[in-house]
Amino acid sequence: MRQTPCVKIYQIHSSTLKLLGSRLLLPSLLLLASCSHPAAKLPKYARVPDFTMTDEDGHAFHSSQLAGKVWVADFIYTNCPAECPMMTAKMKKLSLQTGPAVQMVSFSVDPDHDTPAALKTFASHFGAHWTFLTGTPETVHLLAYNTFHVGDLIGKMEHSTKFALVDQQGYIRGYYSSLDQEGIPALLHDTEALQ
């Protein structure tokens, strides 16, 4: 049976569409999969720069120890009268809910007074089994002010009462109020999404 030119044109277009479709299908599916993943909906803020500080045991702590892990950070100081004890108590509950898969890190914004021994005593008081860090004023300023944007220690002692969520590549993915009752459930939800 002889085909008319019209049919031939349709066959050419049909095969071209099939070829284009197969070339576009995989990227489209990958795009859809990434958009449907809950972590894709989280904002992506600054990347935490490399840093070296000192932990509550007096050991050097390098940011590479957090590589490949989801972690939660807060900024506290041991002489803080109200917010820091409350934040640390909430951080402990959070650590129990997330388990060892999520690393907790508390940065001191008072490096002049928060020695490793002071941090260890503070952590022990709360039964905290995560990392407490102190460092030079320059390192604390770099992290608290320039990177996480949660406060500053130069000229005044101030810090945020928010927890920050950091992904496996070191990007800050969210901020969560430790005072608002919706903050911790949202943090737990987003932590699971990143895992």
Image (cartoon, grey):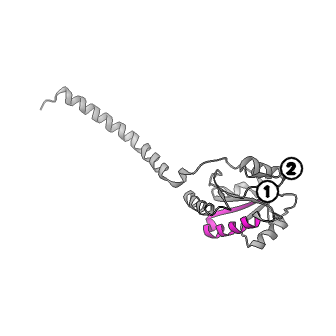
The residue under label 2 is: 155
Q: Which residue is at 32% across, 38% downward?
A: 18
Relative side of 31 to 187, left or right: left
Q: How far apart are the two marked residues, 2 and 1, measured between alpha carbons?
A: 21 Å
Q: Which residue is at 80% across, 54% downward?
A: 158
Q: Residues within 10 Å of mark 1 (few under 14, many from 20)?
A: some
The residue under label 1 is: 53
Q: Which residues are magenta?
A: 84-109
- Residue at the left extreme, as displayed: 1
Relative side of 27 to 169, left or right: left
Classify residue 182 by image quadrant.
Answer: bottom right
Is disc 2 in contact with disc 1, using a CB cutoff of under 8 Å? Answer: no
Q: Is residue 14 above or below residue 63?
A: above
Judged from the image, the secondary structure of the residue bearing numbered disc 2 is loop
Q: Quadrant of the N terminus?
A: top left
Dot in front, 2 or 1: 2
